[in-house]
Image (cartoon, rainbow, N blue to C red):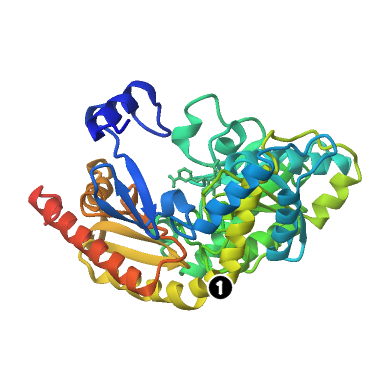
């Protein structure tokens, strides 16, 4: 039975509570229903073709419609759709994937713990980091430090590690023994609050907040620091190059585990397999999800370094696991996905061809009257919409200029996200230079339409 868009929307608003959504407001206008995907494009139920410059939700890295992934899922479902890995059993795809992940990870990582999502991966991080210190006779070393405006998922631990205040306000968060420091956001914080510092000096300053927090809490009480190499949901916040090496130095100095949440940055997004490689650091734990399976099936997990694995394994059971840890179908799809990334040299392509090409094109947006900053890292990018460039003046946040721009994108066949007045993209890693040109034309068109609208509303002079 084929339903019309209106019929689908009516059923959607009657029965479906969407994530991070004002359900009553959505019911009034109806959800946009996506029905098909091919390459970098998706189509809605009214037949509109849309350039998906967000890769679904930062995940469809090899693009839509890859038969190899569908075939892998089909074959595995026919062979063995499910078996668990709890009671001294394992499955072929999960074993092969574990080995493959060790192969594509930095050399300190030889083991993996599987979950079904990034949020579950970060719950695993909290339990594993605390358990590690407990095994070493330091059960009080359990505080985990994250960052304001970081995003680590929506479970109790994930949302607590994250620094989204709107999330903390609902459901009694954060859980105990989680702390936050300020983010290394040059444009919003460095430029305005530390005008005497250059960007690189600000990177060191932002890292010093970790040292202050560790000293404040007591190094003997801090288990780990967690951060996204580039903050994704927070608005593609690319830290100064000085930041991560200094964070690593501080973690080592105070014997605090270093965790990179690679849920967005992992599997090539930044031009290396992992964000930590782009920023030249060696974490002790890494969370992954999304790009591991290009989002075709849910899968996540934690890469566990020898340092952590050796201690935990020497202490018997780790009492933690999910029904779908190492799900054979998800593992089979992830293997096919990683093979595509390797065989088609997609990560190298991002590093040497499409990443630099996007950088050149996207940074040139700074010449647009509405753009106060524009930066990229691999195939992720963010720009800031500003009221005036000289002096640099932001719009009143309450005007929602980012949402105005997002509306024009939606209406003109482009998915570009708004995080406040920061517009962000993370197109599939298979996006070609010609497709980047096409995307840039759409972006410029939507910026122009936004400029016309803010002028007509009297929001700029
Ligand atoms: N860590 C990071 C860095 C993420 O980006 C998660 C953990 C949680 O993963 P799961 O699979 O549990 O969703 C994420 C997820 C957004 C947005 O608004 C970003 C995510 C999820 C939903 C919305 O950009 N990232």
Where on the picture, by quarter, is residue 106? Answer: bottom right
Under tag 1, what secondary structure?
loop
Q: Evaluate whether residue 216 shows in this view.
A: no
**Residue 278, position as x, y percentages in the image:** 58, 68
Image quadrant occupied by the C terminus: bottom left
* Residue farthest bottom in this picture: 352
Q: Nearer the viewer, residue 59 or 250?
A: 59
Q: Evaluate whether residue 461 shows in this view.
A: yes
**Residue 115, position as x, y percentages in the image:** 66, 41
Q: Is mark 1 within 8 Å of ligand 1?
A: no
- Left/right placement of residue 105 relative to residue 430 reads right
* Residue farthest top in this picture: 14
Residue carrying label 1: 345
Picture layout, residue 400 above or below residue 443: above
Residue at 62% in and 49% down: 75
Judge the density around disc 1: few (<14), some (14-19), many (≥20) Cα neighbours within 10 Å. few
Number of marks in the image? 1
Q: Nearer the viewer, residue 36 or 129?
A: 36
Q: Nearer the viewer, residue 5 or 216?
A: 5
Where on the picture, by quarter, is residue 111? Answer: bottom right
Picture layout, residue 350 above or below residue 411: below
**Residue 378, position as x, y percentages in the image:** 48, 68
Residue at 59% in and 40% down: 119
Q: Nearer the viewer, residue 188 or 326?
A: 326
Picture layout, residue 271 above or below residue 413: below
């Amino acid at each position: 039975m084929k339903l019309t868009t209106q019929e689908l929307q009516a059923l959607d608003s009657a029965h479906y509570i969407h994530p991070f959504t004002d359900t009553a407001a959505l019911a009034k206008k109806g959800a946009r229903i996506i029905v098909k995907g091919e390459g970098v494009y998706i189509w809605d139920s009214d037949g509109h073709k849309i350039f998906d410059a967000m890769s679904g939700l930062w995940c469809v890295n090899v693009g839509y419609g890859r038969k190899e992934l569908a075939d892998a899922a089909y074959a595995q479902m026919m062979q063995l759709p499910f078996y668990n890995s709890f009671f001294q059993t394992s499955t072929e795809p999960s074993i092969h994937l574990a080995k493959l992940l060790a192969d594509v990870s930095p050399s300190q990582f030889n083991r993996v713990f599987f979950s079904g999502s990034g949020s579950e991966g970060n719950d695993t991080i909290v339990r594993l980091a605390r358990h590690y210190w407990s095994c070493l006779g330091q059960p009080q070393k359990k505080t985990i430090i994250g960052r304001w405006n970081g995003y680590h998922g929506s479970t109790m631990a994930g949302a607590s590690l994250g620094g989204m205040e709107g999330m903390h306000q609902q459901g009694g968060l954060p859980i105990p023994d989680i702390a936050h420091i300020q983010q290394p956001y040059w444009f919003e914080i460095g430029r305005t609050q530390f005008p005497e510092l250059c960007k690189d000096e600000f990177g060191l300053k932002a890292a010093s907040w970790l040292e202050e927090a560790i000293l404040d809490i007591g190094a003997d009480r801090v288990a780990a620091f967690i951060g996204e190499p580039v903050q994704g949901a927070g608005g593609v916040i690319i830290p100064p190059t000085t930041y991560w090496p200094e964070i690593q130095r501080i973690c080592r100095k105070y014997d605090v585990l270093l965790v990179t949440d690679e849920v967005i940055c992992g599997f090539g997004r930044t031009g290396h397999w992992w964000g930590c490689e782009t920023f030249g650091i060696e974490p002790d734990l890494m969370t992954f999800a999304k790009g591991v399976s290009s989002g075709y099936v849910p899968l996540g997990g934690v890469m566990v370094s020898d340092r952590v694995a050796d201690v935990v394994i020497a202490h018997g059971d780790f009492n933690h696991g999910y029904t779908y840890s190492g799900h054979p179908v998800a593992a089979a799809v992830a293997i096919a996905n990683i093979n595509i990334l390797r065989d088609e040299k997609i990560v190298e392509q991002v590093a040497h061809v499409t990443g630099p090409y996007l950088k050149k094109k996207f940074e040139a947006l700074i010449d647009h009257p509405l753009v106060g900053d524009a930066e990229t890292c691999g195939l992720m990018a963010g720009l800031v919409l500003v009221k005036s460039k000289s002096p640099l003046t932001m719009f009143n946040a309450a005007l929602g200029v980012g949402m105005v721009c997002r509306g024009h994108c939606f209406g003109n066949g482009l998915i570009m996200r708004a995080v406040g007045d920061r517009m962000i993209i993370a197109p599939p890693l298979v996006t070609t230079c010609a497709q980047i040109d096409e995307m840039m034309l759409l972006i410029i068109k939507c910026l122009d339409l936004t400029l016309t609208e803010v002028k007509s509303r009297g929001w700029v002079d």
